[in-house]
Amino acid sequence: MINRLLSPLCRCLFRLGLAGILLGAGCTALAVNAPPATAQAPAEQTLEFWTMQLSPHLDDYVLDLVRRFEQLHLGVHVKWVDIPWAEMERKVLTSVAAKSPPDVVNLNPQFSAKLAEFNALADPEAFMDLTQQKTYVPAAWSANRLAGRTFAVPWYLTTNITLVNTALLQQAALPVPTGFQDLLAMSQTLKQRTGAYAYFPALDGSAPLENLVAMGATLHPPSGCGAGFVNASGASVFAFYRDMYAKGYTPRNVVTEGHRKGVELFLSGQVAVISSGMQFLGSIRSNSPAMYQAVDIAPQMGVPGAKPNIAAMNLAVLQSSPRKELAFEFVAFVTSAAQQMAFARRVPVLPSTLSSYTDPFFTQADPRDLTARARVLSAQQVLRGAVVVPPVRNYNKLKTHYARNLQAAMLGSKPVPQALDDTGRAWSALMGCTP
């Protein structure tokens, strides 16, 4: 069932699609400023636009968006190329090396940051004025910055919420947890009364640094270089996971398998709490109606005052594009409030445009409608949230060292202080920190 549940659309939480709705005012402005009939036809231009695994699910959506943009820009042709998500990084790198990259490409901030390190991406702030920049959620805009320079424009957002199997909690006479320490406290009782696990954190190679921050640790020190969690706060995080594992409160395979396995165990009633996006609810409702009736939602878990984490997908313009000004016009068109609202009404993602969050679609929900409540809660988290793990050089290597040392502490092969110290030394070396 898990393969049916996690369709290509659901597997790619941030790779869903586009919507195209033209503003009437924009069309009017075009008509007023159109050249006279005797004017020379504009030169033909082609923009190449790459997306991640939208086809065939959203062919009509993207093609309509392209058609409308072309209608507003006579002589412009947008060539849409859809890339499987697993191949995007390789294809982009290959195209850059071959000096034949697209003009506009849909990427996540961390991979975009890799390209930005080599000055491969154009700075949006050189082509979009301050008024345009301020239309985006500030936290989403800042997620596309590295070393003080902006490298992409936020497109759409996601944020995880807490999904709870209320039947299991009721059976154990336990409340919905509000924080990670609540999970630790309730885990023994839940296991004894139901045989189920309280939580399945993804602690394989994709170990979420976001949870480190949510639990009160600091990712980097004030200098910005190295690990900011080699202290009592970080030790508390490592000890939490060690205790959950050593006491049998999480499945044994938690150190080798990730979110997909957690979803599978949640659906089978073996795990009471997982962190996932609102888009997962639609799949539960379609594929497991009985489970859907037992599910409730809660905010992201974290220490008091912790900002909810949000994840951004973006549109980047390649520095090598000879049509950067036109490319950014296309980016602004795709990410405008009108387009993003139309998009959000079609697929369960969140806009990166601030004005969208005044729409009743994101502020009102029937208490009986779980999906609508999840959407409103997710919108609230975006407005007060942050991208808690911003782009940083050598991100994948940093994350791998963190995951390996955390796993070592959980398995008992390293005491917590040593695991933290080893992580800190590796991070300092990777980031080139000076003593």
Image: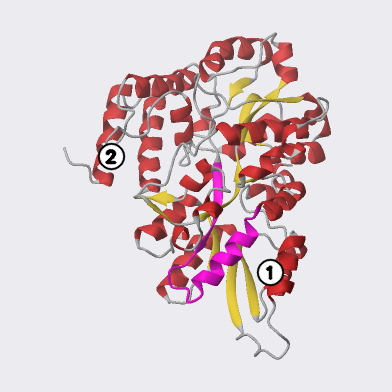
Q: Residue at x 62, y 29 (%)?
A: 274
Rendered location of residue 22, percent (x, y): 74, 62
The image shows a total of numbered marks equal to: 2
Give the camera-side residue of 69 and 100: 69
Answer above or below: position of 112 versus 348: below
In the image, is residue 404 part of the stretch drawn in magenta? no
The residue wearing badge 2 is 225
Rendered location of residue 103, percent (x, y): 53, 70
Residue at disc 2, secondary structure: loop
Q: Amino acid at mark 2?
A: Cys
Rendered location of residue 215, percent (x, y): 46, 24
Neighbours of disc 1 within 10 Å: few (<14), some (14-19), many (20+): many
In the image, is residue 316 part of the stretch drawn in magenta? yes
Q: Quadrant of the N terminus?
A: top right
Give the camera-side residue of 255 and 113: 113
Quarter of the image holding residue 225? Answer: top left
Give the numbered dot on residue 34.
none
Q: Amino acid at mark 1?
A: Phe
Answer above or below: position of 95 versus 354: below
Residue 22 seen in the figure: no
Residue 140 seen in the figure: yes
Residue at disc 1, secondary structure: helix
Q: Residue at x 60, y 47 (%)?
A: 352
The residue wearing badge 1 is 69
Q: Residue at x 67, y 39 (%)?
A: 357
Answer above or below: position of 434 versus 363: below
Rendered location of residue 251, percent (x, y): 56, 26
Which region is colored magenta?
311-336
